[in-house]
Image (spheres, rainbow, N blue to C red):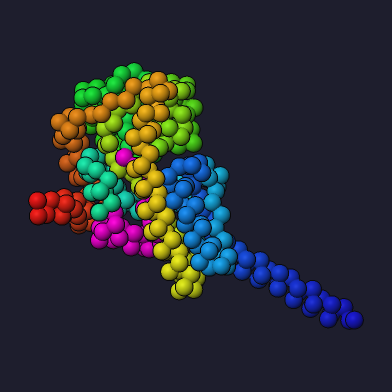
Amino acid sequence: MKKGNMLKIVIALVLIFSLSGTALAAKTIRVSLCNSETHPQSIGLQLFKQIVEEQTKGELKVNLYYNSQLGGERESVEQVKNGLLEMATASAGPMTTFNPRFMVLDIPYAFNDYNEAWMVTDGPAGQALFKSCEEIGLKGLGWYENGFRHTTNSSKPVKTIDDFKGLKIRTMEAPMHMEAFKLLGANPTPVPWTELYLVMQQRVVDGQENPLANIWEVKMYEVQKFVSLDGHIYDPMPLVANLDWFNGLTKEEQKIIETAGLLGQSYSRAVNSAREEYIVGLLEGKGMEVNAVSEAEKDKMREATQSKIVQMIKEKTDPKFVDQWLSSIEQARKDIKAGL
């Protein structure tokens, strides 16, 4: 065989293997998660994985990477945006880096309960927020559950707004979270999720704020004494995909992924709401003191923070969308009370 022909064959084989490798990669969906495999968000994505793989008969394979194996929340969304990763979940705080409209989820004391929050995120306002993600190359697929954020610390129970004064509180790297705690009288310090436990252990700060699932998962009972159920922010974790990658799938595959995304979302919510009361008992069993903040005190906290944060958000993003978000909350409350 001539050397020229041999060279052509080698080149052809290299191209075949390269193309087949690309095709195989396109069939694999890598999802970055910051939590462990037992977190409500993760359990919801395990159902997502099961549905996608079954419905596509294995044509699409979903790999879940827990505990920030592929990077923190901000880094993972950056990878999805740049096409280096298919999907990721992240709290609303880190999402504001890419889409400032997510700041509406940082409005303190905006929701009274989960039903109000779900009605808004699943309704026109929530879908408009997901639609706006397409402007930056992301496709929103579901609001996976993280829960209402509460405050823990090692000094005293937070029962009134005055109890926040002087407390050094770790927050997410989210500007509006920090501003809200400043308005409450606390001293906020942003720390990445992956460094949270170490910061608590070393007493760099007095306390932190997180949903109950996270407080239990990272063993806050080992380094904190008090849990105050103030529910200052509802913090869902959107599942986002690279838009170009998603659009490159077949219509049938897209439909399967979208349906699985919503089913996984609902399952993560059910898991979280069903276990929160149980987690309170577990934390108390570990020696933590848990107190509920009264509605009267929440009103004072809301009055001290909400209008100022809303104004700041309007200055940083689309004010019309902020008004739409707030109107949707009021509409949800009206719908709940309709006919009563």
Q: Quadrant of residue 1?
A: bottom right
- Using the rendered image of the protein, determine whether residue 137 is visible from the camera's viewpoint: no
Residue 202 locus on image (x, y percent): 47, 21
Say whether residue 135 is magenta: yes
For image coordinates 49% across by 61% down, the residue present is 51
- The reply, left or right, for residue 78 in relation to residue 133 is right
For image coordinates 54% across by 62% down, the residue present is 53
50 relative to 300, above or below: below
Q: Nearer the viewer, residue 137 or 40?
A: 40
For image coordinates 75% across by 73% down, the residue present is 13
Q: Quadrant of residue 107?
A: top left
Looking at the rendering, the stretch of residues picked out in magenta corresponds to 120-148
Q: Going by the picture, which residue comes out furthest to the top?
A: 155
Q: Going by the picture, which residue comes out furthest to the left?
A: 340
Residue 222 locus on image (x, y percent): 46, 23
Q: Nearer the viewer, residue 12 or 246?
A: 246
Residue 9 locus on image (x, y percent): 79, 77
Residue 25 locus on image (x, y percent): 60, 63
Q: Quadrant of residue 311?
A: top left
- Using the rendered image of the protein, determine whether residue 166 is visible from the camera's viewpoint: yes
99 relative to 294, above or below: below
Q: Going by the picture, which residue comes out furthest to the right?
A: 1
